[in-house]
Image (cartoon, rainbow, N blue to C red):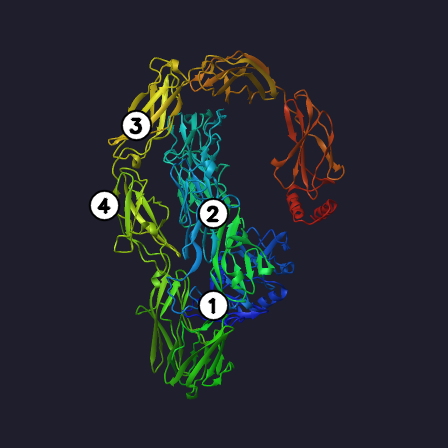
Amino acid sequence: MVSQIVVTLLIVLGHSLAQVLYECPDDWVTYNGYCYLFQSDLPSSYDDAKSSCSIHGAGVLSVDNMEENFYITTWLQKNDPFQQEWYTSGVYDPINSATLNGSTYKWESTGNAIENALMSQFIEAPNIKIVKGVIVYSYGPIGIGWKYVDGTPKKAYICKIAEKEAYRIVLTNRGFDYGIENPDMNKLEFGPYFIQQPHSVVVVSSMEPLVVECIVLANPEPVYKWFRGNNFVTEVNEDLDSRYSVTNGKLTITDPDDVKDSNLYRCQAENKFGKIISDTVEISFGYLGEFNNVQDAGTRAKAYEGAQVTCSKLNYKPAVVYTWIKAGQQFVRPEYQTYIFISANGRLYFSEVTMSDEAEYTCVVSLSGVNQYTIGSLQPPSRNSLPIPLIVDAQMPQADWGPVIQNDFIGVYPSPPLAGQDIRMECFAYGSTTSPFFYTWTREDKPMSTSAFLTDSNRVLIIPEAKLEDSGTYRCTVRRGASKSDTKVISLTLGARPYFLNQLQNQHADIDSQLTWICNARGSPEPVYTWYKNGVKIVTDPDKRITIQKNVLIISHLSADIHDGMYQCGAANTHGTSITSAQLRVLAFKPNLNKYPPPETLMAPLTGNITIRCQPEGSPFPKIEWTHGSNAITSDGSKYTILSNGNLFITSLTNGDQGRYTCKASNTYGVIEGSTTLTIAEGTTIILGPTDQQDVIINKTIFLNCDASHPNGMDVVYEWTFNGFPLFLEEMYYKVVQDANQGSNGLYVVNAQFRHEGMYTCTVRTPFNSQSKSAYVTIKGPPKEAAGVHTLPGTTTSSQTTVAWTAGSGSGGQIIAHFIQYASDEFPNDWTETDAILVADSYRQNDVNENKHSYTVTGLNPGSGYRFRVVAQNEYGRGDPSLPSPYIQMFSAAPAIAPRNLRGGGGSVGDLVIRWDPLHRSEYGSTTVNYKIYWRQQNDKSKDGGLWIVDYIVDPNQDMMVKQVGVDNYYLIYEVIIQANNSFGFGPNSSVAEVYSADGIPLVAPLNVQSVTHNTSAVDVWWEPLAETREIARGKILGYQINYWIEGESPDLYRQFIRYYGNCDKGVVIGLPNDINAVVDVQVYNQAGLGPRSSWYIYETHSFQPLTYPQEIRVTSAGQYQARVWWRGVTITVLEEDLTGYSLFYWVASENYRSATEVFVPGRAHETVLTNLSDNRIYALRLAAVGKGGTGSRTPITYFTFEGQVLIDSSFAETIDTFLSIGVQIQSYIVIIVVGIILALV
């Protein structure tokens, strides 16, 4: 492989490499003012390529014109023998102007649209439906060109940076210590940056204090402020409301209030270097509305077919959980009745319904949170719907049928699905339940996420904390037996709040240089970018030499007075805003050699080569000059070469090369010199070995030099050991580089992990001697696990305990905060996490060991056992959880909460039915629990009225109680309270619930029953609804039953019926024979049963609807965007009802018939004009005759435009419409000509 393709990671060299300003490094190639890195040794996904290029300050390739494209393709032809695909930064963008087949593209690294002239480089038509598509250079039959491919596979890529910014490639290692002699790394001053961003919070019925927090690292310590409102001008502190308090970055709101506190918030942190603002977060409040007091229509189903019952609608925020109760007595349990399914959409589904399923079902909706940042309630509110009837009509069982996946499935929840949520995909099929169904899930385009799992008899696929990469095509297959199956696919498209592929990096730039910052964020939809300086939005400003192009910020001729400060990039879409920040320091100081002085002496072998190091710090980066004794050295590329980093490379050493070499470094602010004495010796010498102490951040890459000088022609072997043992170089984390260019020999540790920390030794061997040099590599990363997690004796009560631990190593960073996670013995793997605990809040000041910490965890359940573990966080991220503590048993106490969801109703006449959700075992507060129920009639005027009657329930799992209140006390309101208790006392009372006693049988029949014919098989029936009073309805009216039978037959033997729900006044009887006389009567019903029957009413059904359809359909133009339709009408026979008119149905030919527009033409007319037609559209048309008996058959499809009839078939209509939708401006008569030609050819 040619040297240009060799990976370059110079930024991780242990010593500060320096690049002469405005020159591309050796491994980069130069063209027309830009530096290019062709990277193929370490293929990456497109996102990883963006991150890798940004480390150098570069972006993935953008191509500005055809000349640059020619240079790239020429380079690839000469230097890419394997004909790989190479990522560019070209992506689909519907906003910009460059077009190809109606699609638009941009260079993501610059934000610029791709020139139209470059569109010819596509060697195949791009498919813009590809998720995360990227333009690549690829090879085709006619040469190198572009393709649009999936950006997730690992491929070669090309980085690009302006030559005037090339100094950043090898000086990226500058830090806040740059230019400081012997700096104390713990006392370096720097501006603020976020360790933890705040999170949006939804408050759900909670009286707990609300806490939102941001954590910032800075020196000197920052000043925190919180602001709110659309423009964030209102500061939130105690002066605004005494309920607010700000402690460091923590905003606490006591007694949170929906009206006062619902708003957008953000945190601000500031010190002397500048100001930064946090992500925008929202504090909102959850709510659960009420069900409508009008009962929903029930569901009528046929036995042995599939069925569904829909929950009544109500409003809520943020989320709800559905459960169902059958016949007011038992919960529906799909885990035991696998032919039943409860969907997240609230519906109750039956694979095959039978007569035993006929009942009234109650939908129970409970408010729930969506994530850990929802402040929940121990008793989230819930609502019970009115009973929803499921009526099953008897019929003979069908032969084994199905499975048939129901139309609502595959269902995806929540909607819309967002990255970071737990995504739930549901699949459910109808079919015979005589044998079991087996559900399987597959992903078609890629492997399934390793975190995905199945539940609910494999009917539900869960993807926890889904990522954008989980977008794709999923298939559900249902099988019954060996041969019967059904399958469906769904394209899952996840939305995502923007997140950054790599954070902005602090920049320590030279005065008067240029800086380009590229902000790489992902989101769905694509984010919009905003740039800030010190918390204030900035825009392109020529006076300040600032240029902003979407996600790219360019500052030219840097000046400390104008440009120093804290910069932020904000990426926003419909799902939120994310912000990344970094500090810009513009430096100007004279050169120095304080950190890396030249060695006093060096030895090199006769006839060998050597590199003499010169590594000054200075800003602007100094000019390097070398002398040998008093003679100036000229870089001639043969004997002497002054490398681009300033080092001096000497070849073919002779005794005359001995002596003193002086490096002179100068810039506009001063001069510094350093000297080295060179001695020539026999054998080999390591002239550039690994630096003694080197640090690397976890998952980054480090390079360890090992360059030896030796006589020409002598065999040399390089060996590496790790902690004294030979290094296994075949491991993917290691790569040895041996190159003829001095300074390029050494070892890469790629994607370094903690286990790679230790002593690395390079040994160079020749037949005559050997030499070794070593370096200790320290891996910086998230903190190590805490140790000794335990609870402090004497701190445990019934609801809290103090957890103590010893902090682990900071792994080269500063531990900022800890998090305590706890799990109960009932749910040992369900860990709950506390808010962030700042080190200052947990540090045990009286302990001699400064790493000792403790914190009190509150809100625990009495009588439960808990274990705890600790997670630490520093500037590099969160570490692994510690080993859990032993279980600690909380003191037993009275129950802390009351049973949830107190409700009731139903039962037999004279019953009062009271229901509740039993407490979970972990909520008992002791070994068991009892229930105390208070109840009384509301507004009771009797002698003992107003006194509470008390009953006790000793079974902790019992969920209902039935009391006899007498048949005269039907449908009365009773007030109910429930309380849990154990041997340690009574818990809190629930709120008062209002419960109705059971209904009484209605005693009044509907009046004024009448009927009129609807069509050949249906009649309309109406009546006067009953007054919905207790005395008349004797309960809640559930609906009316219409009984019907053929005149002359027995109303008791041959009666059929249909029910309509709610206190309605009309209904339709369907499925009747045509042209007959029949009789109807009506009954009202409630939960107790049917009332008396009304008086009879006799009705007659119509004869048939028109049995033929119109003929000779003709379409002609009626002017601009209008078409005239003419037809030959139908003739009515004695079997049909009178004609009332004609209906025309027309729609765009390529769309579904369901989108058709209906136009009714009354009477015996035979033509009409259709208006408001669109240009460049082909329409489909069908006609039908309409009579009193209904709408007749529809004609075959006729195709037309507003200029007349089109004689094409339906399969060709979609092709023509697609052709027109491309955007080509073409007249309809040309379309007709084209169609005619094609038909002629066919």
The circle drawn on residue 793 is 4
Please, what secondary structure does the residue beneath circle 3 have?
A: strand
Above-or-below relation of 70 to 942: below
Q: Which of labels 3 and 4 is toward the front?
A: 4
Q: Name the residue under label 2.
A: 266
Above-or-below relation of 905 to 731: above
Q: Mark 1 points at which residue?
A: 171
Nearer the N terminus, badge 1 or badge 3? 1
Please, what secondary structure does the residue beneath circle 4 have?
A: loop
Q: Which of labels 3 and 2 is toward the front?
A: 2
Q: Which of labels 4 and 2 is toward the front?
A: 2
Q: Position of residue 69 (x, y in %)?
A: 60, 65
Q: Where is residue 1091 in the image (x, y as percent from the top left)?
A: 46, 14
**Residue 699 vs residue 285, the one in the foreground:** 285
Q: Say few, some or many: other residues with alpha carbon within 10 Å of mark 2 (under 14 / 14 to 19 / 20 or more).
A: many
Above-or-below relation of 1173 to 762: above
Cβ–Cβ under 8 Å for marks 4 and 1: no
**Amino acid type, callout 4:** Pro
How far apart are the alpha carbons under marks 1 and 3?
A: 72 Å
How far apart are the alpha carbons under marks 4 and 2?
A: 40 Å
Does residue 368 appear in the picture of this structure?
Answer: yes
The circle drawn on residue 931 is 3
Q: Is residue 1207 left or right of residue 247?
A: right
Nearer the N terminus, badge 4 or badge 1? 1
How far apart are the alpha carbons under marks 3 and 4?
A: 34 Å
